[in-house]
Amino acid sequence: MAVKIGISLIAWQNDDLPDLTRDFTTEGAMEDAAKIGYSGVERGRRMPADTDGLRAYLDRYGVSLCGGWCSGNLMAASVEEERNAIRPQVKQFAALGAPCIVYAECSNTIQGARDTPVSRRPKLTRDEVMAYAAKLSELAKWARDEGVDLAYHHHMGAMIQDAEDINWLMEGSTGELTLLYDTGHLHFAGADPMAVLDKWGHRIHHVHFKDVRQPVLDWIRSEDRSFLDGVAAGVFSVPGDPEGCIDFQAITDKLKAMNYDGWIVVEAEQDPAKAQPFEYSKLGFDHITQICDRSGLAIES
């Protein structure tokens, strides 16, 4: 049993707040990630769109495709319509051996609205989430049959955000739907990351490690600010940052105990003027390798 360590290039190439990272290129980010030692990267919007081009691009830097975002529209679309919409990405990710598609419902999210407080995110009833989960199960079964899992990303500003939402989604869905476990979003949402891991570890297929700066989170809550306000202010950071508040050693110990053997991906969007991407990404990588070693969790190169 071994995990692989990957990274999202969002520290160098922020698609939601592009002005933050306008001085960085995707090529430079890929070179940095490979130099640090990451085995894979999640797909970014500025990478080649075609499968052959993307394969050659990844090979050039010696990294694998370890997932990638998919903006879901299943609340507004039928299962058949959503299958047709995401089919090209499913086929591409299956062809490239990606472990999953990072799927999140975006038809009603406010995560990208800088002027909308995160407190105004859509909150559905249990029955509404359960009905959505049934549709999502059909989509997930189809994707798995096509060769790639859907890993659902609970996300700030979205309808699946906190522990209650996750419980309803998992209870209402079949095992074909897996869960992306994101430490930073869980803490931001007021959830206990360890409790979610204890409850739904058997459904977790993909892991995002990001830390949270508690004083910034307290400011977001007290001033009723938006998710993107928080990102710009530095609410997230990498594991190993002394300003962070999450106990990643305890989480890694639990991953070892549950025989997790997927990807651990560093995904911590920050303002590069305040947190230099190479420096912080290396800090995250070094910290993860250290805590995995202490947990006895082997890392596959």
Image: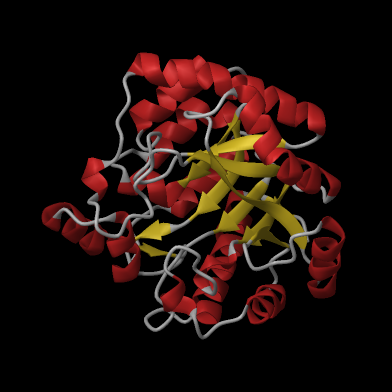
Name the residue located 40 percent from the left edge and 33 percent from the top edge.
195
Q: Is residue 221 toward the left or the right of residue 267 in the image?
A: left
Q: How many marks?
A: 0
* Residue 87 to residue 214: above or below: above
Query: Would residue 257 be found to the left or right of residue 164 on screen?
Result: right
- For the N terminus, the image quarter is top right
x, y percent for residue 260: 65, 39
Q: Residue at x 82, y 47 (%)?
A: 97
Quarter of the image with the C terminus in it = bottom right
Residue 213 in sight from this viewpoint:
no
Residue visible at 49% across and 75% down in the picture? 280
Q: How is the image coloured?
A: secondary structure
Is residue 53 something one can see in this rendering? Answer: yes
Q: Which percent across, then down, holds residue 100? A: 69, 42
Q: Is residue 202 above or below residue 37?
A: above
Residue at the left extreme of this rendering: 222
Dividing the picture into quarters, in which one does residue 108 lie? top left
Residue under the point 79% across and 63% down: 54
- Tell me where residue 56 sits by quadrant: bottom right
Locate residue 127, reporting x and y percent.
Answer: 37, 13
Asked if residue 60 is positioned above or below residue 200 in the image, the reply reads: below
Please give left or right for residue 60 compared with residue 250 in the image: right
Q: Is residue 164 above or below residue 60?
A: above
Q: Which x, y percent locates residue 235? A: 32, 62
Q: Which of the 4 image quarters holds residue 47?
A: bottom right
Between 38 and 41, the residue placed more toward the observer is 41
Pick the residue in front: 25 or 250: 25
